[in-house]
Amino acid sequence: MSHGAPPFGPSVKLDRPAFVDPTVRLFGDVEAGEGTSFWPYAVVRAEMHGVRIGRFCNVQDHAMLHVGSGGPTVIGDYCSITHRVVIHGAVIGANTLVGIGAVLMDGVKVGENCVIAGGAFLKEGTVIPDNSVVMGLPGKVVATRDNFRQCHRNALIYYENALAYAQGRHDAWSDAKLMARVQQQVEQAAARRG
């Protein structure tokens, strides 16, 4: 946990987070995998069910993750939950990016390698298949394509940025060698998929 991060209760379990901003609030049965980062003013609340966040995810500024009355919130590995996103009792597959200001309501199920466009609203019970691009109010699939590289890259860039922030550096994205290394990691991960 980064220096100055707030103490969380005993039910919050973070596995070697890359960065946790001191303004972050985590309550209840919350678990996050290795390398995950939590950015300014992110809030995660888990009262009656748990919130599970995978490895190398990023929960960006002002995001709000909460459980639904009918079940937990679950986020797969290498996901980007971007600025001002609200996730309420939804399940999100690995390598998915949820765009700025999107809202995912109770019972939503999003597959792997998806992009949920900024401002999209996914109403209760919406099911999104793997490799989808979703836009609109209510959110609908507007394209089908393999978004793995794009989403995996975004998650890795945020991971590297989080490591820099944890050291007080705010310039990681201007490092061309770092960006080239991330791209190489993305291509290696894509090759392992087959």
Image (tube, rainbow, N blue to C red):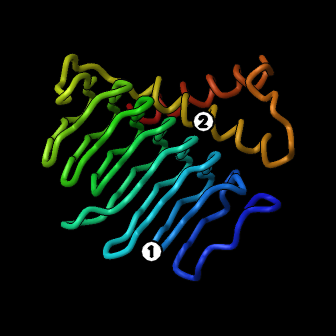
Question: Helix or strand or loop: what does disc 1 sit on?
Answer: strand
Residue at x-position 61% and y-position 65%: 15
Q: Marks 2 and 1, how far apart in space?
A: 26 Å
Disc with the residue nearer the chain's start (2 vs 1): 1
Judging from the image, what secondary structure is the residue with disc 2 in?
A: helix
- The quadrant of the rendering that contains the C terminus is top left
Q: Is residue 151 left or right of residue 158?
A: left
Q: Which mark is residue 29?
A: 1
Characterize the local packing of mark 2: few (<14), some (14-19) or many (20 or more) Cα atoms within 10 angstroms: many
Vertical order, 160 against 176 (above or below): below
Q: Residue at x 38, y 25 (%)?
A: 118
Report the mark closest to the observer, 2 or 1.
1
Q: Position of residue 91 (x, y in %)?
A: 29, 52
Q: Amino acid at mark 1?
A: Asp
Residue at 71% over, 67% down: 6
**Residue 45 x %, y %:** 44, 65
Q: Is residue 120 left or right of residue 7?
A: left
Residue 106, placed above or below residue 51: above
Residue 89 in which image quadrant = bottom left
Image disc number at residue 192: none
User: Is the N terminus in the top left, top right, bottom left or bottom right quadrant?
Assistant: bottom right
Q: Which residue is mark 2?
A: 156
Q: Residues within 10 Å of mark 1 (few under 14, many from 20)?
A: many
Corner quadrant of residue 173: top right
Type of residue at label 2? Answer: Leu
Residue at figure coordinates x 71%, y 36% from the top left: 161
